[in-house]
């Protein structure tokens, strides 16, 4: 038994350890956020609420039916006459000061016509339901954009740390070589101090970069709504030059596809339809209302000589009516509602134009950034190659005593600057291409 418990405990620890050591890919992060993000869940609840409003509007087209009953006890303290009955040849006069009354009714009402207000309300709520769904999709897109932004930043800093670590190793070697040169009198202690300072500065830069890396991982973890204490890490993918330098689709092509799929554009288009329906609802204020109503009622009384069943039958009363209401003067309320609905129409049309303009501007900015950084990456790659060769030559000449400390540090600065430019253009290209893919395809890959 103890062996089984020990085995089970070890299995649990193993599973916990594997979860803690899980490395999250970009797709893992997006999938998890789509299932767990609180903001997205709230948006989805709004859609459910809109669905309930639509069901209520459809139910308003049907007749209403109500059943009611009222039971009451009456008391007449000064009543002096009652019901006379003959029993065994003797007359008995019974005075009932208390009585029990009951009434029962079933009534119904149906709005036959109210200017199309009810049917248009159904259309309006159906549009609202679609808009709520699109709002949830907008929220999902926003979350994906933020995840991609943070994830890309993590990849950039992670690779920057690796570059800095390589630079640190070179700085340590230069410091060691400098110490040797000081020992044989070929370098001053002041120059050695510069090498030591450079090595310490490289160490500090690594610590600072790792701190930033931890901060961005924490931001990503919080965005995913992960609140446990498990260690969080991301999977670092292999990114080839082919992926970075792959052709970027034409700007106009991306925009045309985005117009057909982006939820904010669809929601603005639905807002125009909604304003049209709202105008019809406002105009219904000028229309007559026609309704049908009917009911069945009956009652009982304990003072009656008839039995309860006979009373219910004999006291049945039925009714059926047709109601017509025609508005004549309504204090300009309908006119005001119609005018405001027309203003809403114009506002919705302007909102659509504004959304289209914003969409084009956003896509254009991502497209320009992707294109520009792609070209920068090509140039930076050549610059890194040249700066690397130059620095390696300077380092060798420095070890031979042919170059001074100033020339060596200048070469190192040039190499580091070229490497940073390459990394920045690389991940800026990746991020902006991902955003373009989101606008064109509706997803990040």
Image (cartoon, rainbow, N blue to C red):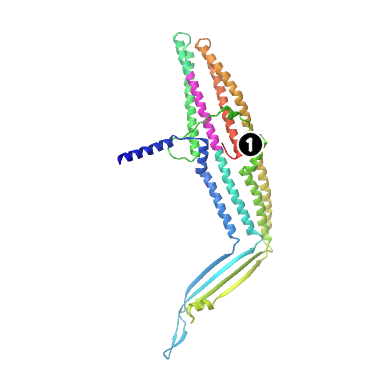
Whether residue 110 appears in magenta in the rendering, the answer is: no
Residue 77, located in which quarter of the rendered image?
bottom left
Residue 364, located in which quarter of the rendered image?
top right
Quadrant location of the C terminus? Answer: top right
| Observer able to see residue 173 | yes
Residue farthest to the left?
2
Quadrant location of the N terminus? Answer: top left
Task: Name which residue lies at 47% across and 16% down.
Answer: 173
Secondary structure of the residue carrying numbered label 1: helix
Question: Magenta-highlighted stretch: main secondary structure?
Answer: helix
Q: Is residue 145 above or below residue 181?
A: below
Whether residue 158 appears in magenta in the rendering, the answer is: yes
Query: How many numbered dots are placed on residues in this image?
Result: 1
- Locate residue 332 relative to residue 172 in the image: left or right: right
Task: Name which residue lies at 54% across and 14% down.
Answer: 393
Bounds of the magenta segment: 145-170
Tell me the residue that label 1 is attached to: 363
Task: Name which residue lies at 61% across and 25% down.
Answer: 378
Residue 123, located in which quarter of the rendered image?
bottom right
| Observer able to see residue 230 | no
Image coordinates for residue 205, horizontal then vertical, percent: 49, 25
Q: Nearer the viewer, residue 370 or 245?
A: 245
Q: Nearer the viewer, residue 248 or 416?
A: 248
Image coordinates for residue 21, horizontal then vertical, percent: 44, 34
How packed is label 1: few (under 14 Cα within 10 Å), some, or many (20 or more)?
A: many
Image coordinates for residue 61, horizontal then vertical, percent: 61, 61
Image coordinates for residue 130, horizontal then vertical, percent: 60, 49
Q: Nearer the viewer, residue 124 or 26?
A: 26
Task: Name which residue lies at 43% across and 39% down.
Answer: 228
Residue farthest to the bottom?
89
């Amino acid at each position: 038994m103890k062996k089984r418990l020990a085995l089970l405990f070890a299995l649990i620890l193993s599973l916990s350890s594997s979860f803690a050591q899980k490395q999250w890919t970009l797709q893992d992060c997006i999938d998890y956020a789509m299932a767990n993000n609180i903001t997205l869940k709230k948006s989805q609840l709004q859609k459910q609420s809109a669905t309930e409003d639509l069901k209520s509007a459809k139910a308003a087209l049907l007749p209403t039916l109500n059943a009611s009953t009222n039971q009451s006890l009456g008391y007449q303290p000064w009543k002096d006459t009652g019901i006379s009955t003959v029993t065994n040849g003797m007359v008995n006069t019974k005075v009932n000061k208390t009585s029990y009354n009951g009434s029962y009714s079933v009534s119904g009402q149906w709005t036959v016509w109210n200017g199309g207000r009810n049917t248009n309300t159904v259309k309006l709520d159906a549009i609202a339901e679609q808009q709520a769904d699109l709002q949830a999709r907008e929220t999902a897109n926003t979350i994906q954009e933020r995840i991609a932004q943070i994830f890309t930043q993590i990849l950039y800093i992670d690779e920057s740390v690796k570059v800095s670590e390589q630079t640190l190793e070179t700085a340590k070697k230069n410091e060691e070589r400098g110490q040797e040169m000081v020992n044989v009198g070929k370098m001053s202690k002041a120059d050695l101090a510069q090498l030591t300072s450079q090595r310490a500065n490289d160490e500090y830069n690594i610590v600072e970069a790792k701190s930033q890396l931890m901060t961005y991982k924490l931001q990503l973890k919080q965005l995913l709504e992960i609140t446990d204490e498990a260690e969080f890490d991301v999977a670092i993918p292999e990114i080839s030059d082919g992926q970075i330098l792959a052709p970027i689709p034409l700007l106009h092509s991306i925009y045309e596809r985005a117009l057909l799929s982006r939820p904010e554009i669809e929601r603005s288009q639905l807002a125009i339809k909604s304003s049209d329906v709202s105008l019809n609802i406002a105009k219904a204020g000028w229309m007559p209302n026609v309704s049908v109503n009917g009911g069945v009622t009956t009652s009982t009384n304990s003072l009656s000589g008839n039995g309860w069943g006979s009373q219910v039958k004999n006291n049945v009363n039925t009714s059926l009516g047709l109601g017509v209401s025609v508005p004549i003067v309504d204090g300009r309320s309908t006119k005001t509602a119609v005018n405001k609905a027309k203003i809403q129409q114009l506002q919705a049309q302007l909102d659509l134009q504004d959304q289209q303009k914003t969409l084009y501007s956003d896509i254009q900015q991502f497209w320009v950034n992707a294109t520009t950084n792609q070209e920068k990456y090509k140039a930076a790659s050549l610059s890194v190659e040249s700066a690397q060769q130059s620095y390696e030559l300077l380092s060798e000449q420095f070890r031979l005593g042919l170059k001074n400390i100033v020339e060596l540090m200048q070469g190192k600065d040039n190499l580091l600057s070229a490497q940073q430019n390459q990394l920045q253009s690389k991940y800026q290209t990746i991020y902006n291409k991902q955003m373009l893919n989101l606008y064109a395809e509706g997803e990040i890959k």
